[in-house]
Amino acid sequence: MAILFIAEGDDPADYRPLLDQELGGVDFRIWPEAGDAAEIEAALVWKPPAGVLRRFPNLKAIISLGAGVDHVFLDPELPRGVPMVRLVDRSLTEQMCEYAILGVLRHHRLLPRYEALQRAGEWRKYPAPDTERTPVGILGLGVIGGAAAGKLAALGFPVRGWSRSAKALPGIACFHGAAGLSAMLAECRFLLCFLPLTPETRGIIDRTTLAALPQGAYVINLARGGHVVDEDLIAALDSGHIAGAMLDVFQREPLPPDHAFWRHPAILLTPHIAGLTVAASVVPQIAETIRRARAGKPLANVVDPERQY
Ligand code: OXD
């Protein structure tokens, strides 16, 4: 039985030897060299081309090489009934939390302004920040959003969190549903997005959401580009209602060279690096998924096909 690697932008050489070691030998095939389709029992995927996964009649697990699975649901012919598993990984969570904290502290401690002063050779002090009076809003209280909420709260920020359905996290003021979202936004000096991209969350950071934030709020998106309505964000930045944005993800990646985000003075952007999958960190759980799938046992971190996360 074989494992198919079908992951755009990832290097199969990072995974093959580690999986071989974990599983005591592995028949590892790299798309499009899939060989006999009936032998493929698991697929390691990132942005698999539409219509490919349905070709393998004995597929027992589709394993996303990331925390998000929206890239798999883009396939309209996705085989029904094959469990899809996402990564829940210490390194990914840590990196995402670091990025969130970096984005918040960079703006909170006025780093861009002090960098500009240094460039101008000017010795000047801005007023001290008041962390206790700087509410931070987190969209998405899953494994990663929940961890970031906890770490920001530990730094002294009052943290509010929003999720689709009701959740309770210690030390976090939790909101849910449409009414909960507007109630939460009204106070947030920062808005951080960790949501899964689903038909319900697409475009959630639009003109209504941005207008509901207080004047001078700062937006950080480390989830998916599809959460943001680009024109609405640019309009809110241009009007000065939103002070700035730090963006790691975009509707189209790589971000097209002529996109206005590249040159906007209030945007700091990075090329989808907030959380990079580290093969050595994730291979043990991938191997465990494959072992369990082979043995017909229930899998961990299975995605609900209805909710798409
Ligand atoms: C992920 C990602 O989903 O890298 O892990 O975006």
Image (spheres, grey):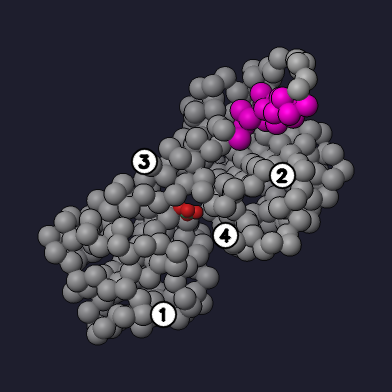
Q: Position of residue 80 (x, y in %)?
A: 40, 74
Residue 90, which numbered label? 3
Q: Is residue 104 magenta?
A: yes
Q: Is residue 81 left or right of residue 200?
A: left
Label 2 SS: strand
Q: Earlier in the sequence, mark 1 or mark 4?
A: 1
Q: Quick check: can you spot residue 146?
A: no
Residue 52, which numbered label? 1
Q: Is residue 176 above or below residue 300?
A: above
Mark 3: which amino acid? Arg
Which mark's residue is nearer the viewer, 2 or 3?
A: 2
Q: Is residue 199 above or below residue 109?
A: below
- In magenta, the rendered stretch is 103-120
Q: Is residue 279 above or below residue 212?
A: below
Q: Position of residue 8 (x, y in %)?
A: 44, 67
Furthest toward the left, the residue is: 24
Q: Residues within 10 Å of mark 3 (few under 14, many from 20)?
A: few
Label 3 SS: helix
Q: Earlier in the sequence, mark 2 or mark 1?
A: 1
Q: Which residue is mark 2?
A: 267
Q: Earlier in the sequence, mark 4 or mark 3?
A: 3
Mark 2: which amino acid? Ile
Marks 4/3 in contact by CB < 8 Å: the verdict is no
Q: Position of residue 96 (x, y in %)?
A: 49, 41
Q: Which residue is mark 4?
A: 198
Which mark's residue is nearer the viewer, 2 or 1?
A: 2
Q: Earlier in the sequence, mark 3 or mark 1?
A: 1
Marks 1 and 4, how far apart in space? 21 Å
